[in-house]
Each structure stands twice: as structure tokens, then as C-alpha cells.
Amino acid sequence: MTNQEIFDKLGEMGTLMLLFLEMAAADGEFTDEEIGTVLESASCFTDQKVDRFVQSALEVAKTLSFEERVAYLGAGLAYFAGKFPADMKKGILVELARIAKADGAIHDNESALFKMAASHLAA
């Protein structure tokens, strides 16, 4: 599946959910605390119910390899960098940090994903 085909399925909010879910799972676990934080973080970016965006992101994630997800998220972050205002980009980084800390520790993979996001979104 191409990045465009993935984006066509997910849109902006689904892409953001994929990013948040990838952060939550980056340490190899997906705890209740992380799930709760993902849902709270998601609600900061939409007035709609986030369940459908999360579900779409989970469905797409299952069809992609780790490398494909990372490549797509890199393209998605580049898209966000060019499209979103500075306060929204900062908000995404703040929420990514919250998700990374949700289980009480920041792991190497979470740190790497945050650095990738910051390289695109920090202005």
C-alpha cells in the first residue's frame, strides 16, 4: 500500500492516531494507562468521537510492517509540519510525550519516535 493509499484510508486524524498508537506500543507493551492516554490525547484534536479514528488506525497498522508504518509516519509528520500551525504541532509533541510517559518510563524506541516527530514538528 502506498503512503497516499494509507492517507486516503486514514486522513489527518487517523494518521495522528496511528502516530499516537505507535508511541504507545513502541516499548513492546500496550498498557491500559497508555490506551487511556492515547484516547485523552486524541480528544485534544477533534470534537468527534475518537473511537472510529483509533479503529481505522489499528486496522491499517495490522496490514503494514514496522518499516512501512515508520515510513508512513515520517511522511505524515512531514505533511503535518507543512500544514498545521505551530501551536498544533507543539500540542502533538506534548501529547506524544504524555503517551510515552504513561507507563512510568520512557523507553529507547519511544525516545526515537519522539525525536523523529520533533525533527519534523519543532519550529
Image (cartoon, grey):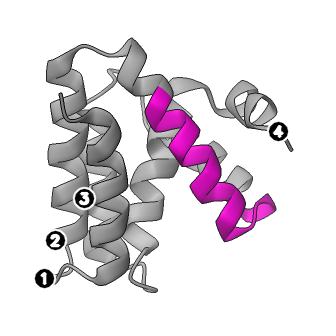
Label 3 belongs to which residue? 37
- The residue indicated by pointer 1 is 104
Which of pointers 3 and 1 lies earlier in the amino acid sequence? 3
Quadrant containing the C terminus in the rendered view: top left
Q: Residue at x 32, y 76 (%)?
A: 32
Q: Amino acid at mark 3?
A: Thr
Relative to 19, does residue 107 appear above or below in the rendering?
Answer: below
Name the residue: 64% across, 57% down: 69
At label 4, counting other C-alpha atoms closer than 10 Å, the crowd grade (few under 14, some 14-19, many 20 or more) is few
Q: Residue furthest right?
A: 1
Q: Residue 57: horizontal and vertical position, in percent?
A: 61, 48
The answer to whether marks 3 and 1 mark residues whose Cβ atoms lie closer than 8 Å is no
Q: Please name whichever residue, 112 or 51, is drawn nearer the observer in this view of the structure.
A: 112
* Helix, strand or loop at mark 3: helix
Residue receiving disc 2: 101
Q: Are marks 2 and 1 in contact (CB under 8 Å)?
A: yes
Can you give x and y, in whole percent of width and height, for residue 113 in the image? Answer: 37, 62
Task: Estimate the spatial distance between the alpha carbons at disc 3 and disc 1, rounded to whole Å.
Answer: 12 Å
Amino acid type shown at disc 4: Thr
CA distance for labels 4 and 3 = 29 Å
Q: Give the spatial CA distance, label 1 vs label 4.
A: 35 Å
Mark 2–mark 1 Cα distance, whole angstroms, equals 5 Å
Report whether 46 appears left or right of 40. right
Q: Which residues are magenta?
A: 62-78
Q: Nearer the viewer, residue 97 or 50?
A: 97
